[in-house]
């Protein structure tokens, strides 16, 4: 599912909301999650999962074209861990 499909689905299920309002709501949610992760905070959505930031240490990598060694700097990467409810639904376990 892409963002526009999510917006369309929410708009269909909530006919009392205007499409532009649904777009603003979805954009605000994603922006807040992004900003919290940029600050190094953890974002937990109960029943769905938790977003966090993990640090990858600097390392020596290889250029795949030339085989030459390349220094790769330390970086932060987003990480998502599924919640129990989502994991159970994906595995066909209904409660």
Image: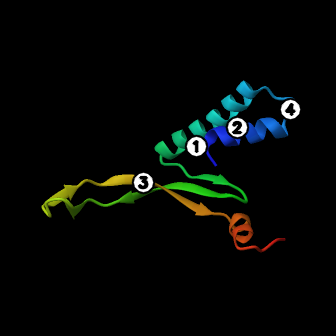
Q: How is the image coloured?
A: rainbow
Q: Which residue is mark 2?
A: 7
Q: Which residue is mark 3?
A: 77
Query: In this orientation, which residue lies closer to the viewer: 75 or 88?
Result: 88
Q: Are marks 3 and 2 in contact (CB under 8 Å)?
A: no
Q: Which residue is mark 4?
A: 15
Which comes sooner in the sequence, label 4 or label 3? Answer: 4
C-alpha span from label 2 to label 1 = 17 Å
Query: In this orientation, which residue lies closer to the viewer: 53 or 24?
Result: 24
Residue 1: give x, y in percent of width and height.
64, 49
Q: Are marks 1 and 3 in contact (CB under 8 Å)?
A: no
Q: Which residue is mark 1?
A: 33
- Would you say 1 lies left or right of 53 here? right
Q: Secondary structure at mark 3?
A: strand
Residue 60: give x, y in percent of width and height.
20, 63
- Would you say 25 lies left or right of 70 here? right
Which comes sooner in the sequence, label 1 or label 4? Answer: 4
Tag on residue 20? none
Q: Secondary structure at mark 1?
A: helix
Q: Which residue does the image show at 69% across and 42% down from the upper left?
A: 6
C-alpha span from label 4 to label 3 = 37 Å
Which comes sooner in the sequence, label 2 or label 1? Answer: 2
Q: Secondary structure at mark 2?
A: helix
Mark 1, Cα crowd under 10 Å, few <14 / some 14-19 / many 20+, is some
Location of residue 33 with respect to 49 vertically, above or below: above
Mark 3, Cα crowd under 10 Å, few <14 / some 14-19 / many 20+, is few
Mark 4, Cα crowd under 10 Å, few <14 / some 14-19 / many 20+, is few
Label 4 vs label 3, nearer the camera:
4
């Amino acid at each position: 599912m892409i963002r526009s499909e999510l917006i369309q689905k929410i708009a269909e299920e909530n006919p009392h909301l205007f499409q532009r309002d649904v777009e603003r709501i979805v954009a605000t949610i994603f922006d807040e999650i992004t900003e919290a992760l940029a600050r190094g905070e953890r974002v937990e959505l109960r029943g769905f999962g938790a977003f966090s930031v993990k640090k990858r240490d600097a390392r020596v990598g290889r250029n795949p074209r030339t085989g030459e060694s390349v220094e790769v700097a330390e970086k932060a990467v987003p990480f998502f861990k599924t919640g129990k409810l989502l994991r159970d639904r994906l595995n066909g376990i209904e409660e």
